């Protein structure tokens, strides 16, 4: 299994508070991704990174920011959490240095915004 | 924009049956296609990656086929078992290849 961990695994927070989710990999892969998964919508890309300090937006990036200061860590921040951001968040890494797919996923973080 | 559709959305079969899951995509200019499995409350597990130059890829009781010209892929599961119960998702690269578009999945239930 690809060495991907996510923390925290579960979080409950209040509307308006900032939240940071962490993804850590031990594979030294260049590409890292953040997705959210919601019933009826499936998996949707939030942001991705193609190197240290290199990031780009995905399909549903509004309300989220990311940072990557080290190859192994990719942080997802909700600056001011809203109830619509209640979801399961998955991190993924790409096994190909050019990002040409095969992606491997972490175990997920279940976030509830009350 | 790439769109991916998976049919059926849910499937219930008795143990031992052979079954086929379908995935269709709108932009046939893909580099490859990936099938995943997701157990309830868990992350996605990569099952098969089939390259555009291949027509089939096999892993144990799983066989994935890819027909780029028609924009379709199928995942064949032979001799299904209750342990195969999960949601199966397919994903294809977007233009530029760095990101994927996922289907919404087929939820499979195999009954003993």
Image (tube, coloured by chain):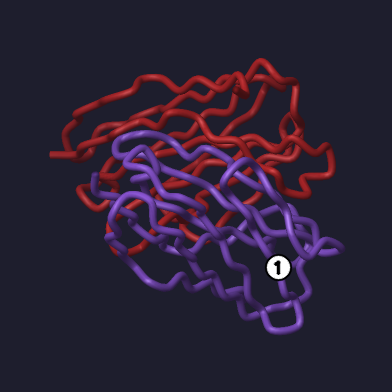
Chain colours: A red, B purple
Q: Nearer the viewer, residue B13 or B93?
A: B13
Q: Is residue B4 left or right of residue B51?
A: left
Q: Point out the residue furthest to the bottom here.
A: B70
Question: Could you tell me which secondary element the residue under label 1 belongs to?
Answer: strand
Instruction: List x then y, in percent, for residue B73.
Output: 62, 69
Q: Nearer the viewer, residue A48 or B95?
A: B95
- Identified at 64% across, 53% down, the residue is B34
Q: How many C-alpha atoms fall within 10 Å of the one at disc 1: few (<14), some, or many (≥20)?
A: many
Residue assigned mark 1: B66
Residue B68 versus residue B45 in the image, above or below: below
Q: Is residue B91 left or right of residue A84?
A: right
- Identified at 35% across, 20% down, the residue is A8
Residue B100 versus residue A9 in the image, above or below: below
Q: Total number of numbered labels?
A: 1
- Identified at 30% across, 39% down, the residue is B40
Which corner quadrant holds the N terminus of chain B? bottom right
Residue B62 versus residue A104 in the image, above or below: below
- Identified at 72% across, 22% down, the residue is A71
């Amino acid at each position: 299994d690809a060495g991907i961990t996510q923390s925290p695994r579960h979080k409950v927070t209040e509307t308006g508070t900032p939240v940071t989710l962490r993804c850590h990999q031990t594979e030294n892969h260049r590409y890292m991704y953040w997705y959210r998964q919601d019933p009826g919508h499936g998996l949707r890309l939030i942001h991705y990174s193609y190197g240290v300090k290199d990031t780009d937006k995905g399909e549903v990036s509004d309300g989220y920011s990311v940072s990557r200061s080290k190859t192994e860590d990719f942080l997802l921040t909700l600056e001011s959490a809203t109830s619509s951001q209640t979801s399961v968040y998955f991190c993924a890494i790409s096994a190909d240095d050019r990002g040409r797919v095969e992606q491997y996923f972490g175990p997920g973080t279940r976030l509830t915004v009350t | 924009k790439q769109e991916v559709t998976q049919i059926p959305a849910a499937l219930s079969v008795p143990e031992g049956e052979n079954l086929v899951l379908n995935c269709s995509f709108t932009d046939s200019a893909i580099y490859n296609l990936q099938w995943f499995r997701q157990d309830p409350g868990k992350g996605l597990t990569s099952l098969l990656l089939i390259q555009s130059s291949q027509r089939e890829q096999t892993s144990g009781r799983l066989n994935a086929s890819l027909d780029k010209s028609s924009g379709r892929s199928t995942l064949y599961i032979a001799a299904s078992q209750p342990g195969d119960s999960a949601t199966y998702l397919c994903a294809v690269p977007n233009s530029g290849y760095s990101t994927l578009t996922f289907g919404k999945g087929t939820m499979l239930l195999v009954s003993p």
